[in-house]
Image (spheres, rainbow, N blue to C red):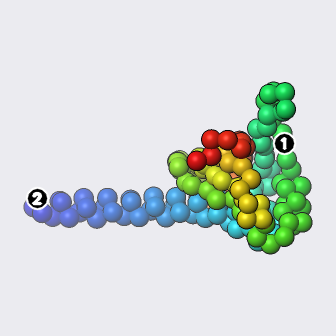
Amino acid sequence: MKKILFVLFAIVFSIGSINAQTTEDSVKAVMNKLFEGMKNSDPSLVIASFGDSAVLQTIATSKDGKTAVRNVKVSDFAAQVSKAAKGALDERIEFETVKIDANLAIAWTPYKFYYNGQFSHCGVNSFQLVRFNGVWKIQYLIDTRRHQGCE
């Protein structure tokens, strides 16, 4: 009887782990699609990664040291991507944290950005994703950018 309970518990636990892994992988896939679109200068991949009312922001520091938040339209960002040479925009991310609850996911992804093969800057992306009709989309993205402390 104990063996049967143990086997049943192991099966239930493994099914839950597989489902969680699949969901996390599908969340990561959306972010990977965004960066694939950037690297391939493909605005359609970029646009497809975002929800219809998505918000893009970047935290910038002015020359006099003041912090500002800049808003960017998804369509403007996609247009910039389309103008880049294929392979010019190479953002390399690490998935440090991914959390999921129902139709909401967050991801914290440190990155290093290379332009035409040369290191440009580093920072962190903070993503919030929403699952619309079973499909994950980026709803909110804010990032930092810096040139130092990029080890």
Indicate whether 40 appears above or below 144.
below
Q: Which numbered tag is attached to residue 149?
A: none
Identify the amino acid type marked 1.
Answer: Asn
Left or right, 143 with respect to 16, comes to right
- Secondary structure beneath disc 1? strand
Location of residue 26 by image quarter = bottom right
Residue ID for mark 2:
2
Q: Nearer the viewer, mark 1 or mark 2?
A: 1
Give me the C-alpha separation between circle 1 and circle 2. 59 Å
Q: x, y percentage for residue 38?
A: 76, 64
Left or right, 101 with respect to 3, comes to right
Identify the amino acid type marked 2.
Answer: Lys
Front residue of 124 and 122: 122
In the rendered image, is residue 88 in sight? yes
Give whichever of discs 1 and 2 has the lower sequence position. 2
Residue ID for mark 1:
71
Q: In what quadrant of the picture does the N terminus appear?
A: bottom left
